[in-house]
Image: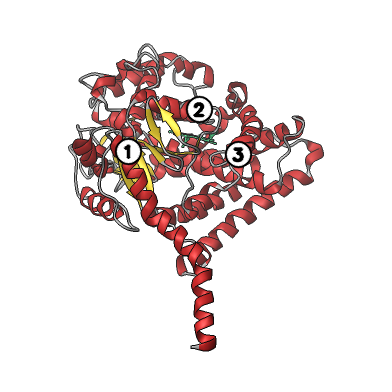
Amino acid sequence: MGYLGLALGALVVALVPSLWRAFVFLTWRPYQVTRTFRKQGVNGPEYRFWSGSIQDIRSMTKAAKEIEMDVDSHDIVPRVLPHYTKWISQYGGTFLYWFGAQPRLCITDTEQIKQVLSNKFGFFTKSTPNPSILALLGRFGLVLTEGSEWFRHRRVVSPAFTMDKLKMMTKRMADCTLSMLDCWNGLIVQAEGQQTAIEVNKQFQELTADVISHSAFGSSYMEGKEIFLAQKELQKIGLATILDIDIPGYKYLPTRRNRQKWKLERKVRNSLVRIIQSRLNSKHLGYGNDLLGLMMESAEKQEGLGMDMDEIIDECKTFFFAGHETTSHLLTWTMFLLSTNQEWQDRLREEVVRECGTEIPNADNLSKCKLVTMVLFETLRLYCPVIRMFRKAAKDMNLGGLVVPKGTTLSLPIAIIHRSKELWGDDANRFNPLRFKNGITKAAKHPNALLAFSIGPRACVGQNFALLEAKMVTALILQRFSFSLSPEYKHKPADMLTLQPQSGLPIVLKPLEI
Ligand code: HEM
């Protein structure tokens, strides 16, 4: 006994607070949260110690990956959110499940969702992302900051996205697209009259990375491309770890994956530091009229809004990831829908030729292409690149009569809201762009039913950029090619952080005389 006993005793005493916290976190709180919701009639799968519902999510998601859908079916939910499909059928539209010991409440009521997204007081914060997503977007970027920090960043970033600034970027968008279309022509010539399919999802990812590299970094776009490649690798790591429970301290261990992540993070950071530093060095010439320049100028002009190097770096990471990945998938799904709805492809081509002729379109004549806009909105409804959003209750909250305890994560499943028959009518699962003929707010029973860019103060700052780019690319393609789906295509929409076709989108293109 003696010293050994004393040492053991001291160890137990030292460990008691940690053990108590672990007990509360892993057992007591799940029990209490479950009880609070059960009393209010909200049910869901049982909490399992430590892993919560993760094993169920894993096995359902794995099985759903095997489902191949009919190309005319747009009901992607059983494939991309199979656990939600199951739990909604068992427990209704509001249910509680567990991401490890973290309670997640799924809500599908549009008024409750609006209440969460419109909250101006920061009572529903972004939930803590996993370390790989953090590496992709940056801790200090607009997507992840909160409170007064977010407010300051938003004021700095917003002026770079006004319509007059975006108009200046349309030529760059057109130039990048035309160079991709030249490559397509080259591939068609090479095929010597044989029908050839081009995998456009990959092409659009490269194109939108090219556009954001030019738009964000101007003449330094080649370095921007390197960032793109490193971010693609980081995204793969993010995807592989998306269902991992966050173990405290694990992110600091030199595992193979962590070491690879650190290396990529360093590469992205070094490239960005070089680009930003060269702007600072030539400050006397002006910061430039690309996104980075406009942001640096805005930070300098508005008193008290200055940003340090780390903040600018993270904002660039955010632009880069948020700005190209989502837009590329919007283009991919638009091509898919126009390939499977040839009459709409013809109508759109007629409209583009009527409004823009065979010239390179500009922001003004693109804004007259109403049918193109409707098709883009309908694509964003059926194949929204972001299929759900999360928020965390920063304090006990009341959501239209439902008490939500502090710390609960709210899951807002956009893909489900976008196909609710109650909101969109009986044809909710059908492609019908005309539902948007009177604009977004009149397309469904609730004015905020389209959530593709989110709503409220934290709605997407880049939505006009994305729509302008998507219109430009679609118009240039329609002017030059007719297209159809390759028989090789397998309709397997998959959530890989953003919604994309699991094995790409091969499209057969036929050049048109212009
Ligand atoms: C089709 C294309 C796009 C879609 C569907 C989309 C979707 C979204 C969504 C749903 C959010 C809200 C996320 C949340 O609150 O959890 C968001 C936020 C954001 N998006 Fe986009 N986005 C697109 C294009 C872009 C582009 C082109 C940029 C920049 C160049 C951009 C930059 C941002 C930023 C910075 C935020 C955070 C805004 C804030 O919290 O204040 N996005 N986007």
Q: Which residue is mark 3?
A: 216
- Picture disc at residue 215: none
Residue 302 lies left or right of residue 49; in this view the side is right
Residue 151 in the image: state x and y as whole percent.
62, 32
Looking at the image, is 5 positioned above or below residue 279? below
Q: Which residue is mark 1?
A: 37
For the residues carrying marks 1 and 3, which lies nearer the camera in this image? Answer: 1
Q: Is mark 3 within 8 Å of ligand 1?
A: yes
Q: Are marks 3 and 2 in contact (CB under 8 Å)?
A: no
Please state which amino acid type lies under the numbered disc 1.
Answer: Phe
- The residues tagged by marks 1 and 3 sit, at their Cα atoms, a distance apart of 46 Å
Q: Alpha-carbon neighbours of circle 3 within 10 Å: few (<14), some, or many (≥20)? A: many
Q: Secondary structure at mark 3?
A: helix
Q: Amino acid at mark 3?
A: Ala
Q: Height in image: 228 above or below 153?
A: below
Colour scheme used in the picture?
A: secondary structure
Q: Nearer the viewer, residue 30 or 261?
A: 30
